């Protein structure tokens, strides 16, 4: 077993609202908390807290409090922050929905999470209405945050009216250890599952990451990583507020807009995923903007190549960092600290964060590996234990038991090494998950969808490397009888039912899917068939 080289930090028994906003000073209240990157509209910390309280008051008035789960289907706009924290302030739970989801996918998540309310924005209204209807959510409990007369005519409340009611936040005793946030993750394999995170989990992870990241109240953070994803939720939305930093929101990634916002708002700390790193390192458009304000950038959500990271650092003149985690870990378990970037390899994920213990297990035997006094350990599956570990999967006790062992260690499904200096490097993964541009794609989800096609007898999906280096889904399909289904038919069918990032990019028709005696797909045999 190995632990963090950093001393434990204090983690208060507090709600997220108390931890983030309870210590605001009069000077803090005047500071800018949020800037809408598109319009430039600013929200101070004082205004933010007042709007969070008013949202909580409105929800309490409508009996949406403890015991209620509320869906949040919204891009990165200031209203997300208000509603997210307003829901938790009211004692309800929130399930955040991927902004790219189809109505079908969103409806499934709402139903699985048991959500009885949904908050969205007008560009998502058609999908939200269909998803809400599928999940049995009535129109008066679908809130269109920026909705105008058209939404009101359809019986949908809006944020302006909620805030205008100016109802006081309820006086509640909220258990910080109860499930409060339910993002969805595929875990180490399988279809998406609700991850039960407590307010204490989120408080703990902010406390654990603060000292290593080195964000200050003078920093301006560009929030392009989605708040619905645990990375953006913890490291941007929550940690930035705790540090009294300024968040500039961006609803979706566009390189020119990303560069403009960074330049015009003098952003100093960028949180990105590897595809953005590629653009920053290579795209000629970068040269047209003044990015001299950027002092640091951290990449997460997928592995960052060390050479690519150094190329970004050299081009922007900033310190480049990498972190590691997963939704089930709230999400951060490892980081390259800002003050140690000059001595920690950039192709590693740095050190274990405070208050965290790790083990490495031999992938073949599950025996614990020895941590060497000198040099680097043998590769083993990384297990993590700490206050950031999830409560479990929603309504999935078997999946929870398979992921968290009796001693409280969470199996990450990733293969890592650790050096005698405590530096951890992810070298491979046991997971079946496909990582495309930072998004997780579960092969089992696509396989289940393909099997609903009347001309498909069997199917399997693996990740392969495309020409641009990204991992993309490839489907192996067994046709039904004498069906004449072709590549385009398979890809078009999948595209109709899933978010764009999950689309199948390659298809190969086969006589049979290789399987073990127990019926498990032998993906290794499929990978041996080559790329493309």
Image: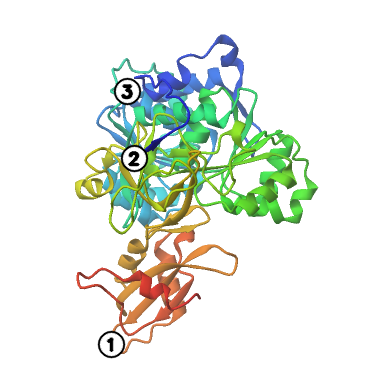
Cα separation, mark 2 vs mark 1, equals: 42 Å
Where residue 39 sits in the image (x, y, percent)? 65, 36
Residue 406 or 31: which is nearer the viewer?
406
Q: Which mark is residue 481?
A: 1
Cα separation, mark 2 vs mark 3, equals: 23 Å
Element under disc 1: loop
At horizontal 29% and vertical 21% (from top left) the residue drawn is 174
Q: Quadrant of the N terminus?
A: top left
- Pointer 2 local density, CA inside 10 Å: few below 14, some 14–19, many at least 20: many
Viewer-nearest of discs 1 and 3:
1
- Pointer 1 local density, CA inside 10 Å: few below 14, some 14–19, many at least 20: few
Question: Which residue position holds label 3?
Answer: 61
Cα separation, mark 1 vs mark 3, equals: 59 Å
Residue 172 visible in the current orientation: yes
- Chain-order first, disc 2 or disc 3: 3
Q: Which mark is residue 182?
A: 2
Label pair 2/1, CB-CB below 8 angstroms: no
- Chain-order first, disc 2 or disc 1: 2
Label pair 2/3, CB-CB below 8 angstroms: no
Which corner quadrant of the image does residue 258 belong to?
Answer: top right
Element under disc 2: loop
Q: Is residue 30 left or right of residue 434?
A: right
Label pair 1/3, CB-CB below 8 angstroms: no
Where residue 294 sits in the image (x, y, percent)? 70, 36
Where residue 245 sits in the image (x, y, percent)? 59, 25
Element under disc 3: helix
Where residue 60 sits in the image (x, y, percent)? 32, 23
Q: Is residue 67 above or below residue 300?
A: above
């Amino acid at each position: 077993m190995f632990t963090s080289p950093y001393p434990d930090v204090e983690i208060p028994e507090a709600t997220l609202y108390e931890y983030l906003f309870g210590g605001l000073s009069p000077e803090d209240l005047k500071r800018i908390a949020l800037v809408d990157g598109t319009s430039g509209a600013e929200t101070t910390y004082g205004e933010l807290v007042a709007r969070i309280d008013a949202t909580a008051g409105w929800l309490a008035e409508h009996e949406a409090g403890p015991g209620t789960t509320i869906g949040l289907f919204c891009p990165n706009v200031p209203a997300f922050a208000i509603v997210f924290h307003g829901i938790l302030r009211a004692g309800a739970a929130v399930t955040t929905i991927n902004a790219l989801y189809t109505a079908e996918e969103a409806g499934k998540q709402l139903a699985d999470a048991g959500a009885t309310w949904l908050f969205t924005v007008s560009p998502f209204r058609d999908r939200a209405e269909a998803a809400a209807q599928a999940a049995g959510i009535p129109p008066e409990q679908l809130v269109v945050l920026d909705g105008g007369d058209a939404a009101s005519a359809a019986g949908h409340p809006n944020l302006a009216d909620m805030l205008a009611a100016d109802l006081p936040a309820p006086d509640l005793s909220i258990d910080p250890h109860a499930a409060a946030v339910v993002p969805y993750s595929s875990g180490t394999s399988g279809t998406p599952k609700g991850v039960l995170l407590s307010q204490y989990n989120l408080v703990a992870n902010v406390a654990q990451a603060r000292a290593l990241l080195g964000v200050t109240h003078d920093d301006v953070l560009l929030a392009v990583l989605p708040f619905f994803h645990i990375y953006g939720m913890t490291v941007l939305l929550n940690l930035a507020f705790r540090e009294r930093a300024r968040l500039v929101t961006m609803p979706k990634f566009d390189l020119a807009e990303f560069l403009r916002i960074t330049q015009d708002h003098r952003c100093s700390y960028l949180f990105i995923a590897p595809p953005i790193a590629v653009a920053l390192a290579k795209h000629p458009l970068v040269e047209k903007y003044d990015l001299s304000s950027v002092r640091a950038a951290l990449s997460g959500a997928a592995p960052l190549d060390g050479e690519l990271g150094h190329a970004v650092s050299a081009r922007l003149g900033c310190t480049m960092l990498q972190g590691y985690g997963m939704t089930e870990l709230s999400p951060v378990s490892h980081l390259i600290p800002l003050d140690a970037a000059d001595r920690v390899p950039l192709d590693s994920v740095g050190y274990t964060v405070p208050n965290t213990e790790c083990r490495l297990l031999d992938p073949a035997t599950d025996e614990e590996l020895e941590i060497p006094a000198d040099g680097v350990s043998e590769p083993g599956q990384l297990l993590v234990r700490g206050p950031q570990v999830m409560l479990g999967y929603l309504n999935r006790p078997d999946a929870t038991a398979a992921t968290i062992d009796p001693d409280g260690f969470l199996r990450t499904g990733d293969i890592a090494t650790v050096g005698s200096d405590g530096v951890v490097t992810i070298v491979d993964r046991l997971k079946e998950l496909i990582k495309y541009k930072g998004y997780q794609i579960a092969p089992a989800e696509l396989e289940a969808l393909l099997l609903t096609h009347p001309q498909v007898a069997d199917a399997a999906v693996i990740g392969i490397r495309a020409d641009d280096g990204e991992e993309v889904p490839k489907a192996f399909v067994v046709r039904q009888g004498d069906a004449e289904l072709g590549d385009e038919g398979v890809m078009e069918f999948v595209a109709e039912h899933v978010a764009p990032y999950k689309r199948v990019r390659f298809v190969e028709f086969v006589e049979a899917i290789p399987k073990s005696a127990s019926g498990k797909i032998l993906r290794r045999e499929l990978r041996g068939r080559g790329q493309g």
